[in-house]
Each structure stands twice: as C-alpha cells, then as structure tokens.
Amino acid sequence: MTERKTAVVTGGGSGIGRAISLRLAKDGFATAVLDINTESAEQVAKEARELGYEAAAFGGVDVSDRAQVDAAIDRIRETFGPVLVLVNNAGLTGTLGFQKITDELWDRMIAVNLSGPFYLTQAVLPDMISAHWGRIVNISSSSAHSGQQYMVHYVSTKAGLIGFTKSLALEYGPKGITVNTIPPGFVDTPMLRDVEAKGFIGGTIADHAERTPVRRPGKPEDIAAAASFLISEEAGYITGQIIGVNGGRNT
Ligand code: NAP
C-alpha cells in the first residue's frame, strides 16, 4: 500500500471483526471499528492505538438502520477521509427449529445480515468509484455451503451474501473495485461459544476440532489473514470469489 487508506469493519468489536480490525490497522489502514456495541468497539480501537496504529471507534451503530449507517459513514469520512475498504462482518446468529422461526426473527436476520451489507456498500461505493479503487470483503458462512439444521434463517442470509458478492463483483470490477466473500467455518468466537452453550452444534467445540482436517477450531486471526490478503494490492485480480477458511471442513 503506497498511501494511507480508510477501512471500515462492521461488527469490529468482537471475535472475527476484532481480529480483522487489528490486522487492517497493523497493515496501515486508518481503521474504523463500527459496532452496535459501543464499549467493545472502543476497546478494540484503543487496543489498536496502543499498538501504535490508527483506529477509531464508531459504536452504537446498528447496521440494519440505513440512517444510522449513513450518519456513521459521514463521521468516518470526516475523521479519516474517503472509505476505500469495507468489511461487512457484523452478523446475527440464531438457532431454532424451522417451524418456530417467527416473522420477526426472520425479518431481523435479513435486516442485520443482508440489508446491513446492502446499506454499508451503497454508502461507501461513491468514495471507491471516485478513487477507481476499492476492496469489499463480505463475511458469509461455511454453513451456506453445507446447510445447517436449526439455522435456516441464518444460513439463508449467508447464502444471499454470496450472491450479493458475485453480482457486485461483476458490476463494479470495471470501476477498480473487487468484491469477495470469506465463509468462515467453526471459528472460536463469542458467537460460536454461545451456539455451543445452547447445545446446537452437536457436541463440544473440542469434539468438532477432532473431526476437522487440520484438527483445531479456527482462530479469528485466520479469517483476518485472508481478509488482509484480499484487501492487499496483490489481490487485485481476485474478485467475485468465495475464499473458504474452514480448516478443510468444507471443500
Ligand atoms: P461475534 O463475536 O458475535 O461478533 C459479532 C459482532 O457484531 C459483535 O460485536 C456484535 O455486537 C456485532 N453486531 C451484531 N449485530 C449488529 C448490528 N445489527 N449492527 C452492528 N453490529 C452488530 O461473532 P463472530 O463469530 O466474530 O462473527 C462475525 C461474523 O462471522 C458474523 O457475520 C458471523 O455470521 C460470521 N461467521 C462466524 C463463524 C464462527 O464460527 N464464529 C462461522 C461462520 C460465519 P453484540 O455482541 O453487542 O451483539
């Protein structure tokens, strides 16, 4: 990277988003840690600054609310300048038998996991088009490949994010913008611990690690490393791709 660019990471206060925020800050991006949770976003931005990197928290932002998203992106531009990197990572999970999924749960899942990336992407695209350079990485889920019982609403949104990625890549490739998706599989984060605690993964995380080809759960840093590469200058010929980071669980 020759000049400092601004990156936005949604859901940057926890798990995978935290690791991506710290990694992009380390890579030299002015990093906006955007999260619905104010405290955790501030904690991650502080952590990055203490390491000598440039980062700021934009907490209390619900990605499913277009007005909040637009206001946050305006504040990020004022703080750091045009946004040329977007990581749509914020996500809501849920485990419930299909017939118990209410309209409200279904709509909320779509609002956070699919409308969120839609609003964020529309908000930052003008900056990328002006610069004739941009990088968008969408965090989907390996469950969109395999399917996952008791998670029909969640998996449907993550599969939607894959189509979103591929279609955007075709439309914006000519404008210098790449769009890719990383579907993580079994990454040890608060979200996965929560699903484990509710008994919905069939055994423990350790049991699953035994059945994973690389014999360990994923680390948030594994996803951050792949995101860092996709965002790098060298990855300019990679777009519209699904880059699985899952220890070989899905191929
Ligand atoms: P996590 O630890 O729960 O982190 C998600 C972050 O997003 C949290 O800080 C959360 O805040 C925030 N968030 C939730 N709803 C939001 C909203 N409406 N607006 C803004 N921020 C919001 O989860 P994670 O495991 O790191 O997951 C990150 C992404 O990876 C998600 O999209 C998830 O679906 C995907 N993924 C994870 C795995 C895995 O194995 N962990 C596997 C496949 C896909 P609160 O904590 O306050 O809710």
Image: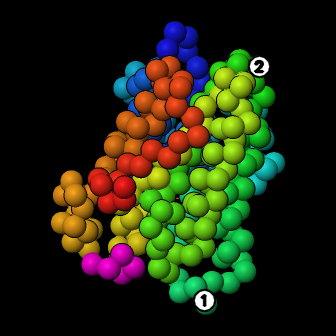
Cα separation, mark 1 vs mark 2, equals 46 Å
* Foreground of the two, 4 or 201: 201
Secondary structure beneath label 2: helix
Q: Which residues are magenta?
A: 198-203
Q: Position of residue 123 (x, y in %)?
A: 76, 38
Q: Position of residue 127 (x, y in %)?
A: 74, 25
**In terms of sequence position, does the residue under pointer 1 or pointer 2 come before the other?**
1
Task: Check disc 2 and report the residue beneath it.
Answer: 130
- Residue occupying image coordinates x 53% and y 26%: 237
Q: Quadrant of the C terminus?
A: bottom left
**Is the residue 226 above or below the residue 37 in the image?**
above
Of the numbered discs in the image, which one, if any, rests on residue 100?
Answer: 1
Residue 7, picture quadrant: top right
Secondary structure that dominates the magenta span: loop
* Foreground of the two, 247 or 202: 247
Q: Position of residue 115 (x, y in %)?
A: 72, 56
Identity, as a three-letter code, of the amino acid under mark 2:
Ser
Q: Is residue 235 magenta?
A: no
Identity, as a three-letter code, of the amino acid under mark 1:
Lys
Secondary structure beneath label 1: helix
Q: Is residue 138 left or right of residue 176?
A: left
Label 2 near ligand 1 (CB < 8 Å):
no
As drawn, which residue projects farthest toward the bottom? Answer: 99
> Is residue 208 visible in this depiction of the protein?
yes
